Image: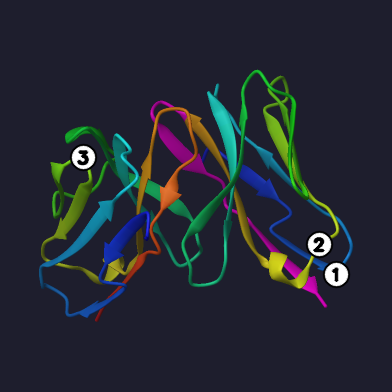
Amino acid sequence: DTAVSQTPKYLVTQMGNDKSIKCEQNLGHDTMYWYKQDSKKFLKIMFSYNNKELIINETVPNRFSPKSPDKAHLNLHINSLELGDSAVYFCASSQAGNGYTFGSGTRLTVV
Amino acid sequence: SQQGEEDPQALSIQEGENATMNCSYKTSINNLQWYRQNSGRGLVHLILIRSNEREKHSGRLRVTLDTSKKSSSLLITASRAADTASYFCATDARSRLTFGEGTQLTVNP
């Protein structure tokens, strides 16, 4: 069983469209995250949720809206996609003080 | 600003040799973690060292942490071609992991 699964794996879409990425973890972790990895492989945190509550919102444009219906799920909705949103988006989960478990990533390409 | 900086940015060695990667950071931390990322894949957690620890081993991995110098190193002994990947250090502070730029390790057969 995949511990942190995110879908879709690849997403190609036109500028201006709205898209969602879904993430689910079956580890029972309390905290989930979204990270963005750019073309230079630099990873930057976007959001963090702990037991469905937003605890980190790291200067991300309002076009990005996370939603956590329960502590096992953290979805990411992106409105009005721009070329600069092209990146790999990683979902992760953790339990306090331990290592993170990452999903396999969603490669978003905006054309 | 970026928390972790790693060097070297790229490292190419022969199979069987040891590989050492270094990481420096700027602020106080709860722990420091190392991750591996194979090309086109997700990140895999390798090892975690807490701020009150100085050295930790896991199989062929050895991690050191010097909080006075705000630096850490990852040593991979007896490297294998399958170790070829990007390696990232990440500091755990303020409820988040902040990643360094990574070291691209290439192990030649």
Amino acid marked by disc 3: Lys
Please, which chain is the residue tagged with disc 1 on?
Answer: B
Q: What residue span does the magenta drawing correspond to?
A: B93-109
From the viewer's perspective, tell me whether residue A59 is left or right of residue B15.
left
Mark 2 nearby-residue class (10 Å; few <14, some 14–19, many ≥20): many
Q: Decide: marks 3, 1 in contact (CB < 8 A)?
A: no
Residue on which disc 3 sits:
A71
Residue in the foreground of this view, choosing between A77 and A23 = A23
> Which image quarter is the C terminus of chain B in?
bottom right
Mark 3 nearby-residue class (10 Å; few <14, some 14–19, many ≥20): many
Residue on which disc 1 sits:
B15
Mark 1 nearby-residue class (10 Å; few <14, some 14–19, many ≥20): some
Gap between marks 2 and 3, in whole Å? 39 Å
Gap between marks 3 and 1, in whole Å? 43 Å
| Residue occupying the point 14% across, 55% down | A63
Secondary element at image label 1: loop
Please, which chain is the residue tagged with disc 2 on?
Answer: B
| Residue occupying the point 86% across, 56% down | B18
Discs 3 and 1 carry the same chain letter: no
Residue on which disc 2 sits:
B79
Does B42 lie within the magenta span?
no
Q: Is residue B84 above or below residue B58?
A: below
The secondary structure that most of the magenta stretch takes on is strand
